Image: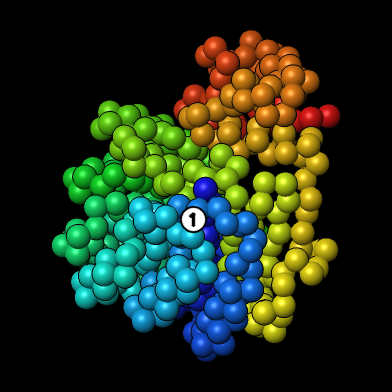
Amino acid sequence: MAGIYIHIPFCNSKCAYCGFYSLPSLKLKERFLEALKAEIVTRKDYLQGDAVTTIYFGGGTPSLLSLKEIGELLHLINAHYPVAPNAEITLEANPDTLSLEYLEGLRQLGVNRLSIGIQSFFDNDLKYLSRRHDSHHAQQCLDWAKQAGFENISIDLIYGLPSSNTEQWNNNLDIFFAYGLPHLSAYALTLEPNAILTKQIEQGKVLPINEDDALRDYEILCRRTAENGYLHYEISNFCKSGMHSKHNASYWFGTPYIGFGPSAHSFDGASRQWNVSSVEKYCARVPEPVEGSDSERESLSTEQQYDEYVMLRLRTHWGIDLKWLKREMGESFSTYCEQHAQPLIAEGRLSQTREFLYLTDEQMLFTDGVAEELFWE
């Protein structure tokens, strides 16, 4: 079992809060696609024949690709990788790039899951975030997606916005629930070092972030999703029964995956590697094997693998499986983890049920600090 991630590094414009690698221009798209296709073919042995059960188009804005371009990439992947017949194929999309015709075309190509960057159903929030769509088009896209036959639809919402308030955040959730969508990714607004919004706040051009607002909205989010039958299965993700993102879950479970495109990461179970965060440099080096540069590869020691397991599993409702640790990594690791967990449990920072260590909704706010206490010394 394995996953494939394809990073499409282009956007129509750069959103003020975004810290991901992308370019607000399409002038290098053709050159990039040729390099991307070369990388897909060149690295076909990386997954060692494991069946590909998830494919994820992320970005950037993958929905800026034409149907023909997406079809060519999927055809190439199917030609060189053993893709499972029921593979989850996700495409991230921004509302300003979507139409009913485009969504119908995606369904015909085999895309069976959408992740739509709504962020808010209110225009004042969208303006604050420098989004290109408006509230009407946000809902129009969801109507089109359903009309096109998509059932597995996720949307992104951002909370803790200075432009919002309790009533508006509740109304955002009301609209989400009214559509009956199976999945929600909800993120607190954070300031990335290289984001436009960070500079705007520093210069006093826009309202600053208030952490108390984010905490208030998070508590509302957790309570209302639970009341409406959604499982809080990861810090920022909520789903109806069985409708979690299989691709993202594979990261948290340590499933091997390969990443194509600039800044994309790959993991084979014992090491990880990543592509350069530059379209120009990426296009210049492909089809040279990415493995050729030591600066882009990190072999993980057993202790590092333990730390990574702790960090990733604490993000989820599945938590740390002490029996798995003992079976797969050895008794010393499971004993170490359980011993270091006891003070955290006593302080109410961590919970335990039989052989599982996990975080409640309230405790998830402090995941990083708890994980650090459990890391191998």
From the image, tell me which residue sits under label 1. Answer: 52
Q: Closest to the observer: 326 or 209?
A: 326
Q: Residue at x 29, y 56 (%)?
A: 121
Q: Residue at x 41, y 63 (%)?
A: 92
Residue 223 location, quadrant:
top left
Q: Residue 19: x, y in percent?
A: 58, 62
Residue 272 location, quadrant:
bottom right
Q: Closest to the observer: 129 or 81?
A: 81
Q: Residue 60: x, y in percent?
A: 50, 69
Q: How many marks?
A: 1
Q: Amino acid at mark 1?
A: Val
- Does dot 1 land on a helix, a strand or a loop? strand
**Structural crowding at the residue carrying mark 1, measured as other residues with C-alpha within 10 Å and reported as few (<14), some (14–19) or many (≥20):** many
Q: Is residue 135 left or right of residue 195?
A: left
Q: Closest to the observer: 255 or 173?
A: 255
Q: Residue at x 43, y 42 (%)?
A: 237
Colour style of the rendered protein structure: rainbow
Q: Is residue 129 left or right of residue 342?
A: left
Q: Is residue 210 visible?
A: no
Residue 144 location, quadrant:
bottom left
Q: Residue 298: x, y in percent?
A: 78, 54
Q: Closest to the observer: 227 or 83?
A: 83
Q: Residue at x 44, y 35 (%)?
A: 233
Q: Residue 168: x, y in percent?
A: 30, 46
Q: Is residue 283 visible?
A: yes
Q: Is residue 216 left or right of residue 292?
A: left
Q: Quadrant of the C terminus?
A: top right
Residue 328 position (above or below residue 181) = above
